[in-house]
Image (tube, rainbow, N blue to C red):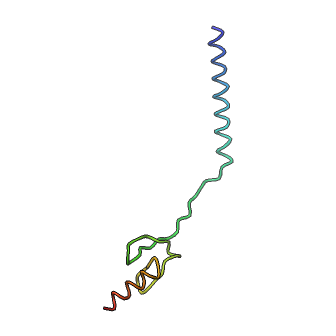
Amino acid sequence: MGLFRLLFWVAMVFAAIWLWRRLSQKGRRAPEQAVVAPMVRCSQCGIHVPREHALPHNESWYCSQAHLEQDSHSSER
């Protein structure tokens, strides 16, 4: 019976420490919020790019100067 009582108290101490650490960490951590940049779709290849990195032309967006030029050459013909 003495071994059972010892194991019970050891388990209680570990449970108390786990609970204390879990509750104390919640108060310290700031909520993590992801910053989501507005995305636009390249009119040439269809990849999504952050709007701040995209190149606008008329009502279209492009991921690179090469795609902007390719699309404007094909629309001129």
Q: Quadrant of the C terminus?
A: bottom left
* Quadrant of residue 45 within the rendered picture: bottom left
The structure residue drawn at horizontal position 37% and vertical position 78%, both measured from the top left corner, is 44
Above or below 38: residue 34 = above
Q: Is residue 39 left or right of residue 70?
A: right
Q: Is residue 9 left or right of residue 67?
A: right
Q: Quadrant of the N terminus?
A: top right
Pick whichever, 5 or 63, lies toward us.
63
The structure residue drawn at horizontal position 41% and vertical position 81%, both measured from the top left corner, is 60
The structure residue drawn at horizontal position 68% and vertical position 41%, both measured from the top left corner, is 24
Q: Residue furthest left?
A: 77
Pick whichever, 46 or 60, lies toward us.
46
- The location of residue 55, given as percent across then percent down, is 48, 81
- The location of residue 16, given as percent across then percent down, is 66, 29
Q: Residue furthest top?
A: 1
Above or below 71: residue 11 = above
